[in-house]
Structures are given as structure tokens and as C-alpha cells.
Image (tube, rainbow, N blue to C red):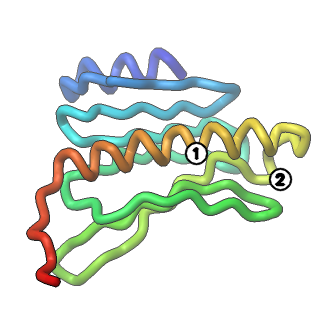
Amino acid sequence: MKTILKNLARDHQFQFAMQEVWGDKALALDSIHKVFIYQSRQAGAEANKVIALANATFCKLEKKKDKVQILIGIQDALGVYTETVCIYDTQYDDTTEAGFHALLGEKWKESIKSVIVSETTRPSKAA
């Protein structure tokens, strides 16, 4: 998984401020180019996502009994749609690791939010 991230960084000139690899999954964040990457090679749950954060409007963590997901709202010409990154699913992951994944999700949510807030200027609303 580290090789995949290294190749992505080289091929697209990404500069990962943070990256994390565990099991068959990897997350990376480039705050300069405003890109979040999720890779999963887990059997049955393969995923490759490169999410541009330039038009992101929110990031939140959804913790359910059977899943932990990062939800990122992206604004486009048609409105806001949600990119979902599932970092824990009882169908594929060890149920004893739910707490680890919840903490991991919280850390990444905050990091993504900081990129969204720092890189996005929105006019303040009048009182």
C-alpha cells in the first residue's frame, strides 16, 4: 500500500502532509493540492478514491454499529453530493477493532476539515 501511495505522489506530484497505512487500506492527504486519497485492497471491499477538496463544503464522521465512514460534501454545478469513504465495516473488518477505526476516522475527519476551512474562503453572513 505504501508503494501505491508513493507512485501516486510521484505520478501526480502530490505532497502528502499525512498518510496512514493499516492492513489492506491507506489514507493520504495533500493539503497543498487539496486532495484526499483512499485506497483499499481488502477482498470484497476494493476501492480507489482520489477526492479533490477544492470544492468541499463539509467533512463529518458517521459512526454506526456496523460501519465507520468519512463523509465529504462536494459542491458542483448540480449541487452538493457526498463522497463516502468507509474505513470500517463489520462485513470485512475485525469487530474488536471498531474503537481503533473510530479514533482513526476522527483524526482524519479533523485533518480534512482543516484543509477545507483553511483553503476555502466564504463570505460571512450578515447578522
Q: Which residue is painted at 79% across and 42% down in the image?
A: 99
Residue 27 percent location from the top left of the image: 49, 34
**Left or right of 103 on screen, residue 108:** left
**Left or right of 113 on screen, residue 116:** left
- The answer to which of 24 and 126 lies nearer the viewer is 126
69 up-or-down from 27: above or below:
below
56 up-or-down from 113: above or below:
below
Tell me the SS state at disc 2: loop
Q: Identify which amino acid the numbered label 2 is placed on.
A: Thr
12 up-or-down from 99: above or below:
above
Question: Which residue is label 1 attached to?
Answer: 106
Residue 25 percent location from the top left of the image: 60, 33
Question: Which residue is label 2 attached to?
Answer: 90
Residue 33 percent location from the top left of the image: 18, 36
Q: How many marks?
A: 2
- The answer to which of 106 and 54 lies nearer the viewer is 106
20 up-or-down from 110: above or below:
above
